[in-house]
Image (cartoon, rainbow, N blue to C red):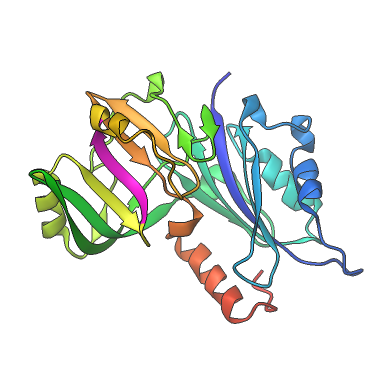
């Protein structure tokens, strides 16, 4: 057992020549047929319809081994029903999420994948005994890990083989207000990154986080890394995905929902 790959795919559908479109159960069945109908290593399977535009799309999370072979095979075998696929992937032996996309024909996963970036537009930080808030926009790397997910809101770990706490430098945070951000990170142990009011990352002392009662987060789920009495909490998802190709495609669909962007 090893090289477990978390896959979070958004599948944009189209109708075939007879007007037929894939149903959710057909998508899951076809997608996982080469995995004997189950997500690899017992990963949870989550699927939901995305109703942000008239074009039909489904978001599905599941697990594969090492590479998204099942997703590539699904695309190759069902091209008459699929207009576009984007997928965020996280390998348990890696550091960060990667993004892949299919439009005409998929290529080699390791050659075409790109590091996936996530956005934030606000920072809250603890100053003495109270929190302050600052509107500050930027992007960073993140983790969307399905391993040991107890429910769709919380991954309650630590994971023993991910015991190296990521520093803010390793997150490769990019912002136009870098000096202000560095000052906040230097002076506060508890910093919360938000996007549209949703917590997408925070570094917090373990005891303080436990006092919060592991409250559910409105994002897709949380992945938690532990070291030295601190948690790194990642809650990034499709809602704050900052991949340029994905955002360009989504914006085109919203402006012209019948346009073929493939």
Residue 149 location (% of width, % of height): 52, 31
Q: Can residue 147 be seen in this view?
A: no
Q: In this view, does 150 lie above or below 135?
A: above
Quarter containing the N terminus: top right
Q: Is residue 26 above or below residue 177?
A: above
Residue 133 location (% of width, % of height): 19, 58
Q: In this view, does 208 lie above or below 83?
A: above
Residue 91 located within the stretch drawn in magenta: no
Furthest toward the right, the residue is 18
Furthest toward the bottom, the residue is 256
Q: Is residue 226 visible?
A: yes
On the image, which quarter does residue 7 sit in? top right
Q: Residue at x 67, y 78 (%)?
A: 259
Q: Which residue is drawn at 46% across and 49% down?
A: 219
Residue 251 location (% of width, % of height): 53, 74
Q: Which of 83 and 226 is in front in this view?
A: 226
Q: Which residue is drawn at 74% across and 45% down?
A: 73
Q: Residue at x 50, y 47 (%)?
A: 220
Quarter containing the C terminus: bottom right
Secondary structure mostly taken by the magenta-highlighted segment of the chain? strand
Give the residues drawn in magenta, as a range: 198-205
> Left or right of 210: which side holds 106?
right
Residue 71 location (% of width, % of height): 68, 45
> Left or right of 68: which side holds 175?
left
Q: In this view, does 143 lie above or below 198?
A: above
> Left or right of 163: which side holds 59?
right
């Amino acid at each position: 057992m090893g090289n477990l790959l978390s896959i979070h795919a958004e599948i944009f559908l189209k109708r075939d020549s007879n007007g037929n479109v894939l149903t959710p159960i057909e998508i899951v069945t076809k997608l996982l047929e080469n995995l004997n109908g189950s997500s690899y290593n017992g990963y949870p399977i989550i699927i939901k319809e995305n109703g942000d535009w008239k074009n039909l799309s489904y978001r599905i999370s599941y697990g594969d081994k090492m590479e998204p072979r099942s997703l590539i095979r699904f695309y190759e075998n069902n091209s008459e029903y699929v207009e576009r696929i984007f997928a965020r992937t996280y390998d348990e032996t890696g550091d960060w999420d990667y993004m892949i996309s299919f439009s005409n024909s998929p290529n080699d996963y390791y050659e075409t994948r790109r590091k996936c970036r996530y956005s934030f537009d606000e920072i809250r930080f603890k100053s003495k005994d109270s929190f302050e808030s600052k509107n500050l926009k930027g992007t960073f790397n993140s983790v969307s890990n399905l391993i040991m997910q107890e429910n769709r809101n919380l991954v309650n770990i630590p994971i023993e083989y991910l015991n190296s706490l990521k520093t803010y430098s390793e997150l490769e945070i990019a912002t136009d207000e870098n000096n202000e951000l560095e000052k906040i990170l230097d002076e506060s142990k508890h910093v919360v990154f938000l996007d549209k009011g949703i917590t997408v990352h925070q570094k917090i002392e373990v005891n303080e986080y436990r006092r919060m009662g592991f409250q559910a987060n409105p994002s897709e789920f949380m992945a938690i890394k532990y070291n030295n009495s601190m948690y790194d909490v990642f809650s990034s998802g499709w809602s704050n995905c900052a991949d340029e190709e994905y955002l360009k495609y989504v914006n085109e669909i919203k402006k012209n929902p019948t346009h073929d962007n493939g």
